[in-house]
Amino acid sequence: MKHLADFSPDRRLRDGVQGMCRQCRAAGELARWRRDPESARRRTRAQYHKHRAKRLAKHAAWQRENKDRLSDYRRERWHANPTARDKQKVATAAWYRRHPEKVAAKNRNRYARVRAGGGSVTAEEWAAMLSAYSGKCAYCGTAADRIDLDHMVPLSRGGVHVIENVIPACLRCNSSKGARTPLEWFVAA
């Protein structure tokens, strides 16, 4: 005897549930796929295109509502899968090559934020800051090949480009931190 919970709801029917349980429907669908895979693909494609806008809107809404969950998932996947990391690096580099105008616009916008925020960091100030941290990342302590200048209060959030607001960071930490403050980044990690 099957429980009512084993059946999918269907408002079109008088009793409000489908006539076949979920398990039987899945078995029937699998049998149809095996009998005629091309026809099943056509039906699936047609259903997708019929409801494409609705699906995309629902997906976008889910992503907006689950930003933290999605971010955590992507971060875990990134660290757990070196192959995916390498693929992403290749894909990103390819995107940069295909869209030089967008890259230039991004760089211009950043430069404008630096100029609008005022202040400057001289080469001597930056060298002294690197020396104070022994040429290592201020966040993880790694002596990486490339140490970047990181704004503790990001320029995009009103930070100013002055020596008091910058700190040396390895590429990994700087990219991971993004447009967050160190406290926000540590709490999220």
Image (cartoon, grey):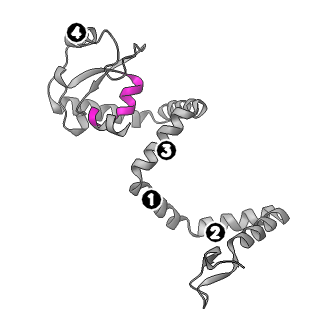
The answer to if 21 sits in the magenta stretch is no
Q: Give the crowd class for mark 2: few <14, some 14-19, many >=20 residues within 10 Å.
A: few
Nearest to viewer (mark 1 / mark 3): 3
User: Bounds of the magenta span?
Assistant: 170-183
Nearest to viewer (mark 4 / mark 3): 3
The answer to if 177 sits in the magenta stretch is yes
Q: Secondary structure at mark 1?
A: helix
- Give the labeled residue for mark 4: 128
Q: Secondary structure at mark 2?
A: helix
- Give the labeled residue for mark 3: 73
Whole-percent x, y for residue 47 in the image: 64, 69
Whole-percent x, y for residue 77 in the image: 53, 39
Q: Which mark is residue 47?
A: 2
Q: Secondary structure at mark 4?
A: helix
Q: Main structural element of the magenta stretch: helix, strand or loop?
A: helix
Q: Give the distance between the C-alpha atoms of the residues marked 1 and 3, in whole angstroms.
A: 14 Å
